[in-house]
Amino acid sequence: MGLTVPGAKQTKPLSVAQSSPVAAPSAPAKAAEAVRAAILDVAPAQAAQQAPAQQPAKDKPAPAAAPESVLTIQQLKEKADALDRQEKALKTLETDLNARLAKLQELETMLKGMLAEAKSIKEEKMRHLIDVYTNMKSKQAASVLETLDEGIAVKILAGMKGRQAGEILTNVSAKKAAKLSEMLTKMQAMQDLPETP
């Protein structure tokens, strides 16, 4: 007795014992049972065979994984090379910075020299100016000092001898003389006097 599929051609039913001339009416059922039994018997055997391959044997210890902190010789060489390159770069930077520092110190020395020279020239000009006013008559010096900037006038008076400065101040207007005297006192208190000739 064969199985039929609707819409399909009907063929002769297959049986395991097709070669035997007399087939029992339950032959296809027995054949299906035999195939089913064979499949069921093979599946557990295959699963048992595959299971040992998938699971490591409990008797054999698993190989220990290499610790992450252990470096290979090649990695150590690469790190050493990188450190050497960084050290050379730092030495180059240090040399460059030392050269720049030396140049800055040279410039600082040059600027200090220029400032000292400018101060010296300024003081020399001031001394010359004081000498000029000292050699003038007091009335003439007083009339010129009244037109000068008060800061310069005070420095000129501070550079003169006291008697000469007093004679000049007596010939200046009272208001101007008071202002110059006040500034002269403050200047002497700060001890910012040029050298007396």
Image (cartoon, rainbow, N blue to C red):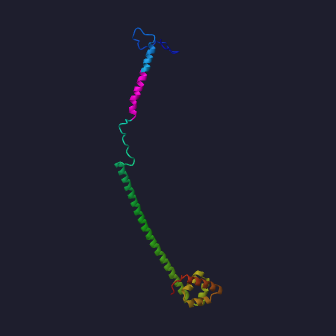
Residue that lies at the very extreme toward the front in this rendered image: 59
Image: 33 above or below 190: above
Decide if residue 153 is in sight here: no
Q: Is residue 64 above or below residue 126?
A: above
Viewer-nearest residue: 73 or 15 = 15
Q: Nearer the viewer, residue 80 or 130?
A: 80
Q: Residue at x 46, y 15 (%)?
A: 29
Residue at screen point 45% across, 68% down: 104
43 drawn magenta:
yes
- Residue located at (61% from left, 86% from top): 143
Q: Magenta region: which residues?
A: 38-55
- 98 up-or-down from 44: above or below: below
Q: Is residue 151 at all visible to an observer of this figure?
A: yes
Q: Nearer the viewer, residue 92 or 166?
A: 92
Please provide percent x and percent y for residue 195: 51, 85
- In the visual, does 157 lie left or right of 56? right
